[in-house]
Amino acid sequence: MSERQAEVGAVMRNMAVFLSWTLTSFLCHWCAKAFLSSIKVEIQSQQETEAKSLQFRLNLWGASLVTLVQMVLCYLCVNMKNKKARNFLNVARITHILATFATNISMDMMFASSTFAIKLSVVSHAIANIMKRVLVVLLLYLGGTRQASLENFLGLLICVFGLFLYAWDKRSREQKNNTGSGNGAFSAISAQESNFISNKLRTSLEVIKETQRIHYNMFGDALGKFKYCMLIDTADFENKGDPAITAGEIYYLARSGLQIVYYCNTQMCSEAHIDRAAELAKKFSKDDLVILAHGGGNIDKYVEHDKFRFSTIEKFIGFQIFVFPQSIRLENPRSEHWAKCQKFYCCNRNLTLVLRDLGSLDIARRYFNGSTRLLMAPDMAFHIGPVKRFVSPAFDIMWVKRTDSETPGYKTIPRHPPHLRLHVSDWIGFRTPNSGNSLERSFHAQVMGLFFIQRGRVVIIDRLHGHILATLLDIPHVLLDNQHRKLSNYFRTWNKGLQNVRVTDNAEEALDMALELLEIYKDTLPPRLPFMQISSAFKNINFTLPEMNYP
């Protein structure tokens, strides 16, 4: 046999020995665990003390018996060749017996091995095992039972060097903000990275959980080091969508441990109030305080909200400024106001601008191509979380029809089957009860939005937050898009996998889709409120026409 063949044979024998040792070790522990698990005492409350004492004694006897069997098998199967190191071998036998007994006790009582290992990460556990093995090898070398060649020492050196690199990479780093970073190019999280999972989800609950996960993961990197925040331009007015965003932002901040030290709503965010906030900010470290701007869909479209952000950027110099998810509606790229938007939003290393949909992200990439950090994330209202219906529907179809500048523009409502009730209204007229402070009004307004949506068994909606609140309620609904594609842009960016949602830009199709949803979900939708008595004054009313004469 050649020397090469002898080496290969030795390697194969060593591999066979290693695999056999691994398999027998597993079987040994598996059988021991199965045996120890079989000697459990059923503890009754009236005999708890006696039962626990008996169980402890059984644990000790069981572990001792298993250890004895294992040691006998080890003594019969293992041949100790080194007869000279008698004292060392005796110590080795005793320590091996103790270690085996401790392992069996830990498997039986689950105090030692499991609880400590569970607290370790996978990598830390692996590193601990490596260190244990290195220590064992070193002890064997020191005891004279092993001889080390140059290759062995080189291998040990490589292992130690790798451990050093791992530990060095985990060293405490100085946290830095983006004031000292950036090379003139903006940072953007790709849409494929942030919405890949969300668009494949089929149920409302899955979408809600994924949206919140995205926020915690993505925003945690940007906001995780801060302790305090100021929230600018919160909403407490009757447009139920913006208060829903505010409520979601407050929920997120509370769960993230960020303490609000100042806020102002849209009506109160005057120059004087922002100046006052800037003075207050001087009492905080720039490493502890972050300035937050309310999210929504108002970049360029609603000038006053941009002005709040412009003023904030100008007066909180050096502080990190974070704009919650926004949509961009570009009215005129040659306008003076859009030029200001480009000036303030494109080139600020302290600014993080979060876009709410792919269309807005594309506009930001084209026009805000500076040092501002660009992210894409879903709407903050999802932090309200899933809501169970708390109102019985009065109508088969609730048609939420906005009348402001963002309306889709359809003028007539198509006729519906006479056995169904269809109501058309906008939630602006669905008044919120008076409340104490501004944030309380925000929460009450979003509750009224949830109330309003539940008036229908299914809903037709031309408001984005009608879609979001209906998703929180898990109500089947139809999105009726406008010419700016505000609803479809968001839906196709994040929620296009939802089974109980349809999208169209045609009123006739919207009604057909709503009727389809009524049929699909007829067995799970709550029944319409019964109206047992109808006044004679209504006998001549044609109920195939929509009901539109009240909120």
Image: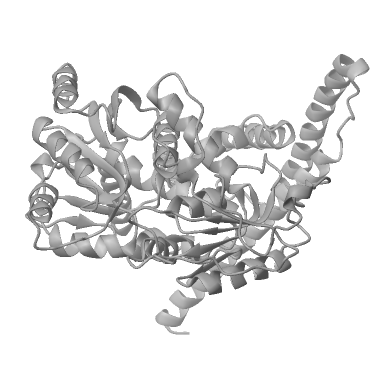
| Horizontal arrangement in the rendering, residue 88 relative to residue 177 (left or right) | right
Whether 549 is drawn above or below 273: the answer is: below
**Residue in the picture at 49% in, 49% down:** 426
Residue 66 can be seen in this image? yes
**Residue in the picture at 79% in, 49% down:** 536
Q: Position of residue 518 (x, y in %)?
A: 69, 64
| Horizontal arrangement in the rendering, residue 270 relative to residue 149 (left or right) | left
Front one among 164 and 51: 51
Front one among 6 and 368: 368
Name which quarter of the figure residue 71 lies in: top right
Residue 144 can be seen in this image? no
The residue positioned farthest toward the bottom in the image shown: 1
Front one among 360 and 299: 299
Quarter of the image containing the C terminus? top right
Whether 77 is drawn above or below 511: the answer is: above
Front one among 235 and 33: 235
